[in-house]
Image (cartoon, grey):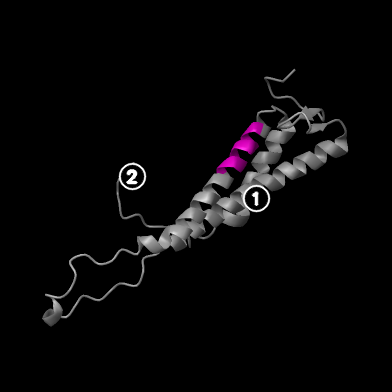
């Protein structure tokens, strides 16, 4: 029967029936695996954000036409968004993989084992410290002041 409150002990079923721990060695190896998966989650999130920032970088600005060529200048400049589809697909793929890993970590925590909970939280914190806690060099200024956009 599944526990509905937090408990401490080495006997735990994580994610599916095939991942059961009955020994302290198996339990500790499972906790290390969950800790590493949590840190990897933070790495993937940092990598996805960097890919998104690189994909969203504005192309070199096109200088305005000279006053004599104003009649020949197009009204709308060609959009460079068409060339960004591979980067957008990569970002979407990374988002999907990261979301799936996040949900699996959530389901592992829902085993209600205290050690599993601590391993996931420590892994997330260590991954954030290692991969995402820069000194503000990755700050992005948003042009839209609306928080809902």
Q: Which residue is at a point 51% across and 55% down the rendered structure image?
A: 90
Q: Which residue is at a point 30% across and 49% down the rendered structure image?
A: 145
Q: Secondary structure at mark 2?
A: loop
Q: Which of the marked residues, 2 or 1, is nearer the chain's N terminus?
A: 1
- Relative to 68, does residue 144 appear above or below in the rendering? above
The residue labelled by disc 1 is 40
Q: Which residue is at a point 53% across and 50% down the rendered structure image?
A: 93
Left or right: 78 in relation to 118 = left
Q: Secondary structure at mark 1?
A: helix
- What is the spatial separation of the Cα atoms under label 2 and label 1, in whole angstroms? 29 Å
Write down the region rendered in magenta: 99-107
Residue 33 in picture, x, y percent from top left: 75, 44
Residue 25 in picture, x, y percent from top left: 87, 39
Q: Are marks 2 and 1 in contact (CB under 8 Å)?
A: no
Which of the pair 26/117 is nearer the observer? 26
The quadrant of the image that shows the C terminus is top left
């Amino acid at each position: 029967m599944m526990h509905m409150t937090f408990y401490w002990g080495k006997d735990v079923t994580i994610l599916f029936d095939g991942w059961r721990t009955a020994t302290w060695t198996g339990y500790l190896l499972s906790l290390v695996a969950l800790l590493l998966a949590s840190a990897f989650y933070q790495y993937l999130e940092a990598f996805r954000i960097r890919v998104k920032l690189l994909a969203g970088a504005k192309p070199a600005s096109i200088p305005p036409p000279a006053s004599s060529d104003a009649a020949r200048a197009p009204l709308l400049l060609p959009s460079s968004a068409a060339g960004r589809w591979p980067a957008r697909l990569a970002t979407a793929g990374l988002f999907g993989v990261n979301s799936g890993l996040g949900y699996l970590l959530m389901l592992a925590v829902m085993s209600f084992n205290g050690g599993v909970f601590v391993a996931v939280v420590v892994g997330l914190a260590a991954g954030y410290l290692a991969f995402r806690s820069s000194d503000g060099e990755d700050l992005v200024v948003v042009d839209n002041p609306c928080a809902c956009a």
